[in-house]
Image (cartoon, rainbow, N blue to C red):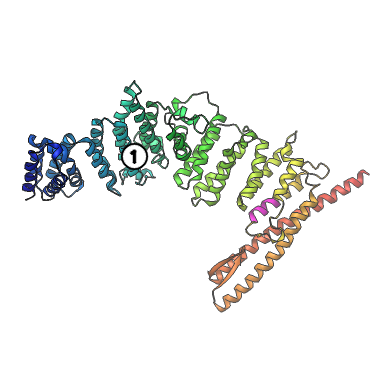
Amino acid sequence: MAVEELQSIIKRCQILEEQDFKEEDFGLFQLAGQRCIEEGHIDQLLEIIQNEKNKVIIKNMGWNLIGPVVRCLLCKDKEDAKRKVCFLIFDLLVKLCNPKELLLGLLELIEEPSGKQISQSILLLLQPLQTVIQKLHNKAYSIGLALSTLWNQLSLLPVPYTKEQIQMDDYGLCQCCKALIEFTKPFVEEVIDNKENSLENEKLKDELLKFCFKSLKCPLLTAQFLEQSEEGGNDPFRYFASEIIGFLSAIGHPFPKMIFNHGRKKRTWNYLEFEEEEDKQLADSMASLAYLVFVQGIRIDQLPMVLSPLYLLQFNMGHIEVFLQRTEESVISKGLELLENSLLRIEDSSLLYQYLEIKSFLTVPQGLVKVMTLCPIETLRKKSLAMLQLYINKLDSQGKYTLFRCLLNTSNHSGVEAFIIQNIKNQIDMSLKRTHNNKWFTGPQLVSLLDLVLFLPEGAETDLLQNSDRIMASLNLLRYLVIKDNENDNQTGLWTELGNIENNFLKPLHIGLNMSKAHYEAEIKNSQEAQKSKDLCSITVGGEEIPNMPPEMQLKVLHSALFTFDLIESVLARVEELIEIKTKSTSEENIGIK
């Protein structure tokens, strides 16, 4: 029945001119053709399409059959023989139909699927899509539309993360990336071969450039790369990245020029659209490009060999800042790798303090602090801590001093502040051991820094448990200063500031400890009483109410807090004992001299 309907429609249209075809004819043709496929009359449909008498009709109406034919090809339930015939029909339609209509039809089919069907659809339609676009005159618009549609669909696919996931390629992203390179190559070659630099050729360049930058962002920003020792030349993302960077150079945008001009007042692009894009969208793409070149070494041989390590660090810091602002594990990891790669090229203590006047040289360590304190992944937290230490090591003395002040004022985290205080102690120790004192970690400059360290933020009412790491680090620093610096020498300025330290730090700490211990001892008593009655109760720790928990667990928490207070109290007592011994000894020496 469906075949007879289709033949009837064709017979009626054969006597008409192209311009006389009616809209209802298109609809009836599509409906009848679709029913032929559904009812299994595929061989008869092939004969109708192959008939030379129907050439004009197929040219104008045949594109309506693309959807049903493609859906048939994607259906795995179809017999191999029927699928083979469907492929023949598909090839004929691509060859015979109006390319403009075919382009839109193919792109609609690419947009339709979701999940794992996205890659199946793209892999099936890329070659026909390439053939259709090459027939069109307005190639720049067509390739731009196609690449944008393809990228939008590929961006919906999850990026494989582990070696096993890359090899399994469940969603087909790796296969699609490789196929997309083959799809794009002829158009890149067309740009290279066209020496006239016509307006159409420039537009084609722009569309290819947009695609390259979109690809650098997705999937390459989040993609993981196999170790070069284990990839055996089969890393799909390394291949994709290398080809994309190669495309950039081929269409007249060599990556050294782009990455070193990015962010400057002088624009890289010739068109307003790209000027607007650079501020809003390209930061991720440029960061991804920097990582691919400097960490993965892709096309790094194209870089000038005369670039200094400090210049490369300055260039990369903006990109590292972009990486650290993201939340994806793979992206943060790339930022840390790029930072490590850049810092390891530099001698310790050679990074001048003036670099901290560049915004990214302060925002990057602050970004590291956020990863250290907020990231749920332990390996990234530890790596960030190691990178912050490496960064500190590369700064000169004034740079270290400036960074310490900045992080003490901005980190708002007891553990981070303890880490900075330990670094301050290390710098003081190095300064005292040198023949020429370092002015940044002795005398008045150090006193100013100690004002940020040896104090309690809210005086005696400071939450000692929440700030215990910082307080212990501060007490250990003070103990070190008392032991190492004699009152007569007073290299650190400690002894002239001792009165302020006692008033702002030691005395409030005593009061705070007494208040905190009294509070927790009362809570322990309440918890023990609750344990006897076997009731659940809530308690307050660090200013926050702990949810209802068994009394045994509450007691453990409370005793742990008391142990922390006892530890702080013992170090505090030792510091005060050392101060008393030192001041008494100095007084006796002075009396002896007199």
Identified at 17% across, 34% down, the residue is 95
Identified at 53% across, 34% down, the residue is 342
Q: Is residue 485 left or right of residue 343?
A: right
- Residue type for callout 1: Ser
Instruction: Measuring from the top left, give residue 502's x and y in whole percent.
Output: 77, 54
Along the viewing direction, whichever of 113 and 386 lies nearer the viewer: 113
Q: Residue furthest front?
A: 20
Q: Is residue 494 above or below residue 263?
A: below
Identified at 16% across, 44% down, the residue is 26
Instruction: Measuring from the top left, give residue 587's x and y in whole percent.
Output: 87, 49
Q: Would residue 375 be visible to someone looking at this image?
A: yes
Along the viewing direction, whichever of 24 and 258 lies nearer the viewer: 24
- Tell whether position 374 is magenta: no
- Tell whether position 470 is magenta: yes
Along the viewing direction, whichever of 242 and 230 lies nearer the viewer: 242
Q: Is residue 335 above or below residue 462?
A: above
Q: Quadrant of the C terminus?
A: top right
Q: Residue furthest right?
A: 594
- Span shown in magenta: 468-475
Instruction: Measuring from the top left, give residue 343's x and y in whole percent.
Output: 55, 35
Q: Residue 91 lies in what quarter of the image? A: top left
Q: Residue furthest bottom?
A: 533
Q: Is residue 92 left or right of residue 406?
A: left
Disc 1 is placed on an element classified as helix
SS assignment for the magenta stretch, majority? helix
- Which residue is tagged 1? 148
Q: Is residue 306 left or right of residue 400?
A: left
